[in-house]
Amino acid sequence: MNRIRKSGGFRASIFVIVVALVVYVAVYMPTPYIIYMPGSADEVKPMVTVKDGDQEERGVFMMTTVSATYANVFLLGTSLFNRNMQIDKKEDRLQGKTEAEYSAEQVWFMSDSQSSAMEAAYEQAGVKYSIVPEHIFVFGLSEDPKPQGDIAPGDIILGVNGTATPDNTVLSAQLKDKKVGDTVEMQLEREGETISRDVKLIEVKDSKTGATRPGLGVMIGTVQKVKPEDSNKQITFTDTQVGGPSAGLMFTLEIYNQLTPGDLTQGHRIAGTGTITKEGVVGPIGGVVHKIVAADRKEAEIFFVPKQNYQEAEAKAEQIGTKMKLVPVNTVDDALAYLKTLSAKS
């Protein structure tokens, strides 16, 4: 009897161990893969406001996103049976960047996209404006040599040794007379908090000329404020919690709709994607197949797609059998011209 009990207990222990191992492998064991799938189609109007703008909008403009998840074994298996899931390697996504650098870069792209959308919309609406540098954003760190101090991707550089540094030109002037090995006090904003950190200057090489100089060892960009002459046309963005440059076109259309009288949507549900330049040129994006699915799930009737992405988008639209009309565009003018052909939806 004792032997039977011991044998049963042993088998139970083995069973528990096997189950735990299977759960670990399926759910918790890391893999070198990432899975892309349809994200969301979000209304743009709550994200951007023109002061004293025309708020009439019976339909909606929607920006579309791609969802990215680092894959466990279970998700990899699931993706084999789901045509809307796409497997890729993490290293192809990061391109040599750290996770923090990749995330900061996406934040920078979104900020730059918003600035370009404001300029493009102001240009279309004939609103005079100026560009004012606000601050410097850190989106990467040099690898060799590494920065010598507590400065990180996502930091906003507010000043050096107590002097404000709104752009790269001012920052360079602040460091011009310093030597490699000198320590400077950096005024930074990190996660909403203002902090001071000492950073030792290192030798950095100019990528264009090859000349060396003392520097921080960071990759930076200037965040600009687009300021209209008429303060009643000032544009304000909310925090979208989304990164990347691909919402530029849809931001531009929403801003233009608020800057001008009437309602461009005519009561329709309009989604889309595409980068934007201040001249109004629409650029290609990644993940268009996932954005088509996301827009279809939100019952979009029209989808603006960059001309370069149209064939891929069209194939996906046919695959899922959507009734959504795809409209290829090269410029914001193309999108506006199409919108002006819409009849009001009852």
Image (cartoon, helix red, strand yellow):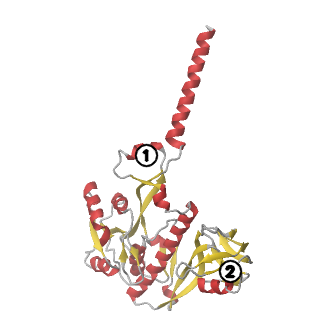
Residue at (64%, 69%) from the top-left corner?
A: 145
- Residue at image coords 37%, 74%: 283
Residue 334: horizontal and vertical position, in percent?
29, 79
Element type where label 1 sits in the image: helix
Instruction: Give the class, few, some or many, for how many residues have Cα within 10 Å of label 2's Cα (few <14, many ≥20).
Output: many
Q: Position of residue 48 (x, y in %)?
A: 48, 75
Residue 172 seen anywhere in this rendered image of the structure:
yes
- Circle 1 residue: 76
> Where, quadrant-wise, is the C terminus in this rendering?
bottom left
In-front residue for pair 273/86: 86
Residue 228 is situated, as x and y percent measured from the top left of the image, at: 50, 88
| Total number of numbered discs in the rendering | 2
Quadrant holding the N terminus: top right
Which residue is at the front of the view, 96 or 54? 96
Amino acid carrying label 1: it is Leu
Across and down, in percent, residue 127 comes to: 43, 90
Residue at point 58% right, 11% down? 4
